[in-house]
Amino acid sequence: MLKINIIGAGLAGSEAALYLANNGYKVNLYEMKGIKMSPAHHSKNYAEIVCSNSLKSDDENTASGVLKRELTLLGSTLLNIAYKTKVPAGQALAVDRDAFSKTITNLIKENKNIIVHTEEVSNFDADAITIVATGPLTSDKMCQTLKTKLGQEFLYFYDAASPIISAESIDMTNAFYGARYGKGDNDYINCPMDKEEYMNFYNELINAKSVILHDFEKKNIFESCMPIEILAKRGIDAIRFGPLKPVGLINPHKKDKPYAVVQLRKENKCGTIYNIVGFQTNLTFPEQKRVFSLIPALKNAEFMRYGVMHTNNFVNFPKVLDEYSRLKIDKNIFIAGQLSGVEGYVESIASGLYCAINVIRMIENKELISFSADTIIGGLYNYLLNANSNNFQPINANFGILNPIDIKDKKERYIQFRIRSLNEINNKLKLIKTIKE
């Protein structure tokens, strides 16, 4: 039997290791903590929560809530520990970060099927199936190995993502389709502003509150990509001559040329979610909602993902990975967690579980399992697989990545998303549970 190696004991790696071990498979888990720490980590425990202790909403009719229920059905160990170590946080699932990590660390160290290797890995074992789950701050040695294997251009070193909003929340009475100079097939939704609207937006943007960066991020986070609020501070017309330039566009509602135009680009093929072009930002999430909603067409915008800018390692999923999160050039290597392009704690747990399920399928010589975009976990991988590889950005759980349901009432639609999703997961469990048979 092939060996199973897991590199990295973060959320994805720990979930994968425990799932495999609990199903009777021997696992080598490699973690460099103990001899070397990434700049963001402080504890020697595994599955460390480094930022907020919130795992987002636990409401069953939110995307995050549905994903948690999917993972519960699939047998996630880490999510089970999260519920056991939760602290009061309203409708959110928040954990006691120390208790959460310590419990997982103890489970790993006490599991007879897991051998922990405290070392920094710099290469792959050709005789093993490997899950690489080294996280958003992958070590220099592993980064170099990945660059050599994949090519320099397929591994990124910062995450500069613009916000994504739901298509149905765009006010089309204040927006119109079209491309600058009439070039293209009206691929963009244009959100015009007159001078007064622009000046109001501009003044709020340059005075909005930003996220405080880690010291290790301050040195190079803005070298290759300029946040919209930093660009705006260069001058009153800096963004109007940049991502908001109105040239070549006529507003059909007013039959005039707008003073400034914010463009939205489809983020998925079915057009349920749109990216705010050029709006990579370091503003806090509440400030993004407040300031960007000053754009008339976005006054009711529903943010499916907020913009982020921070040091981050991730591969170009649609270029280098297949639908099972394996390297296209080496099917024995899986990429899990934030390195694969998922954003968020629960999403990382889901990624580790998904890879572990299919490692077992490979070992058992059974057909690998995928999930459709009727489920959140399937929607995540459908997005990653089919994203624009020339402008790839990580994603987290949201209803915009699901196959649409034609129900106007949002509350009822979200209920049906949940019902449909859990039906598929339950059906897939009939296949997955043959693993032990």
Image (spheres, grey):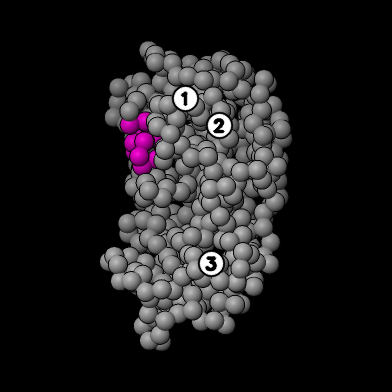
Is residue 327 one of those drawn in magenta?
yes
Q: Amino acid at mark 1?
A: Thr
The residue that label 2 is drawn on is: 138
Bin the neighbour count of mark 2 within 10 Å (Cα to Cα): few under 14, some 14-19, many 20 and up.
many
Residue 385 found in image quarter? top left
Quarter the N terminus occupies? top left
Quadrant containing the C terminus in the rendered view: top left
The magenta segment is 317-328
Inspect this view and state whether residue 207 appears. yes
- Closer-to-camera residue (368/159): 159
Q: Which one is earlier in the sequence, the residue at label 3 or at label 1?
A: 1
Q: Which residue is mark 3?
A: 239
Place of residue 176 in the rendered image (x, y in percent of width and height, measured from the top left): 38, 76
Asked if residue 103 shows in the view, the reply is no
Q: Are marks 1 and 2 in contact (CB under 8 Å)?
A: no
Give the alpha-carbon distance from disc 3 to disc 1, as whole Å: 39 Å
**Label 3 or label 2, whichever comes before in sequence order:** 2
